[in-house]
Image: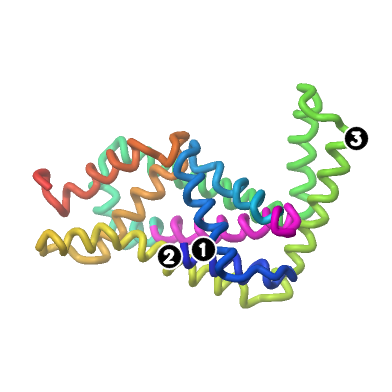
Amino acid sequence: VGCEATCSHLILGRLGHRAPLRRCLGYSFVGFYVSSITPSATGGQPAQIYYMSRDGVPAAHGALNMMLIAVCYQVVVIGYALAVALLRFDLVANLGGGLGLLLLFGAVVNGALTAGMLCLMFLENAARRLTGGVLRLLVRVRLVCPEEAREKLEKQMEEYRRGADCVRRNPALVPALLGLTFCQLTALFSVPLVVYHAFGLTGSGALDIIGTQALVTLAVASLPLPGAVGASEGGFVAAMRLFFGAGL
């Protein structure tokens, strides 16, 4: 929570908003809570944007903040998994067929989402074609009014462009976000390692356990289940049996 809050504090500050760290901590608590009770953790970021808007942060800037954090999160998770796959492919093989397919699904979905978010922020023409196609579909099924929706979309795209320009003017921002996210995820992935040593177990390296937890996280994070409940626990038990043994 602290790492994510610090990321929001940095981004909103660069966008010209006064966002004390304690307030950003509140946004992060909201995000973690709502993500845990909505399918595929989809509700956390809209809830955070809503609370930011109540504090005077434009929705587009709040969305840009959450998109940058999400991109960094996905990049670090995929980077972890890719490093494990390249350096210790035996750990991937140990997941078995079912969890291996989920890992492939998670990698594809997360990669596509990351590419889409980067497109919205930095590739104006591609983003306009993508959002235009979605808008035409919504108009065709009569879910939105075309004139009003186009006007709102244009305003949002303009705000995204301004936010992307802000990122370009602050080249140190993205490396700082990636570093904080790496610390956050490394701490999270290290929890099984701490439990492993708490049981007095030995014989498995820290990188093996941390890398396996990264693979499990990528495999189950995109499943359409509230908080990935069930899949997280089942995947964890299947993957960690190698280190903890069947009894534990």
How far apart, in angstroms, are the residues tagged by discs 1 and 2?
8 Å
Count of all numbered marks drawn on residues in the image: 3
How far apart, in angstroms, are the residues tagged by discs 2 and 3?
43 Å
225 magenta-colored:
no
Q: What's the residue at 17%, 59% (across, down)?
A: 196
Task: List the residue tagged with mark 2.
Answer: 184
Q: Secondary structure at mark 1?
A: helix
At label 3, counting other C-alpha atoms closer than 10 Å, the crowd grade (few under 14, some 14-19, many 20 or more) is few
61 magenta-colored:
yes
Circles 3 and 1: CB distance less than 8 Å? Answer: no
Identify residue type, mark 3.
Glu
* Location of residue 146 by image quarter: top right
Front: mark 3 or 1: 1
Q: Is 199 or 18 nearer to us in this picture?
A: 18
At label 2, counting other C-alpha atoms closer than 10 Å, the crowd grade (few under 14, some 14-19, many 20 or more) is some
At label 1, counting other C-alpha atoms closer than 10 Å, the crowd grade (few under 14, some 14-19, many 20 or more) is many
Q: Would you say 15 lies left or right of 44 here?
A: right
Pinpoint residue 187: horizontal percent, then vertical percent: 36, 65
Q: Is 79 or 56 nearer to us in this picture?
A: 56
Identify residue type, mark 1.
Glu
Q: Is 192 or 52 nearer to us in this picture?
A: 52
Identify residue type, mark 2.
Gln
Q: Secondary structure at mark 2?
A: helix
How far apart, in angstroms, are the residues tagged by discs 3 and 1?
37 Å
Task: List the residue tagged with mark 1.
Answer: 4
Name the disc covering residue 139, or none: none
Q: Which residues are magenta?
A: 54-80
What's the magenta bit mostly, secondary-structure-wise?
helix
